[in-house]
Amino acid sequence: MESTTNVYTIERYTAEMDAGTYIKDFHDADYFIKFCQQCGNYGRRYGCPQGFDFYTESAKKLNQIEYFCTTIAISKQKRLQL
């Protein structure tokens, strides 16, 4: 889906994939956990990855579907102040 103004274009993309495929092909917790552990809030926030193992095993068992969404804003101007 695309929206356009005279200043920028917005592109929206969505995809879905079963959790087993996502985990097998794209989920690399061992790589990303290093970055999380450097954060001063590591282990203090809901989104912290302590539950990754639980999540990956649960998602596989439930045959869960993952939904991915992203939005990209493309400026038509050389310098767009945000």
Image (tube, rainbow, N blue to C red):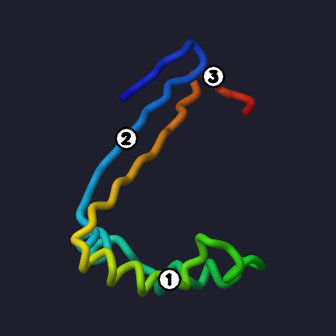
Residue placed furthest toward the front: 62
Classify 10 Å Cα crowding around label 2: few (below 14), some (14-19), many (20 and above): few
The residue under label 1 is which amino acid type? Answer: Gly
Residue 68 spot, x, y in % from top left = 38, 53
Snapshot quadrant of residue 1: top left
The residue under label 2 is which amino acid type? Answer: Tyr
Snapshot quadrant of residue 36: bottom right
Vertical position of residue 22 compared to residue 66: above or below: below
Q: Camera-side residue: 66 or 72?
A: 66
SS state under label 1: helix
Task: State left or right for residue 32 relative to residue 41.
Answer: left
Reading the image, the residue beneath label 3 is 77
The residue under label 3 is which amino acid type? Answer: Gln
Reading the image, the residue beneath label 2 is 13
Q: Nearer the viewer, mark 1 or mark 2?
A: 1
Residue placed furthest toward the right: 40
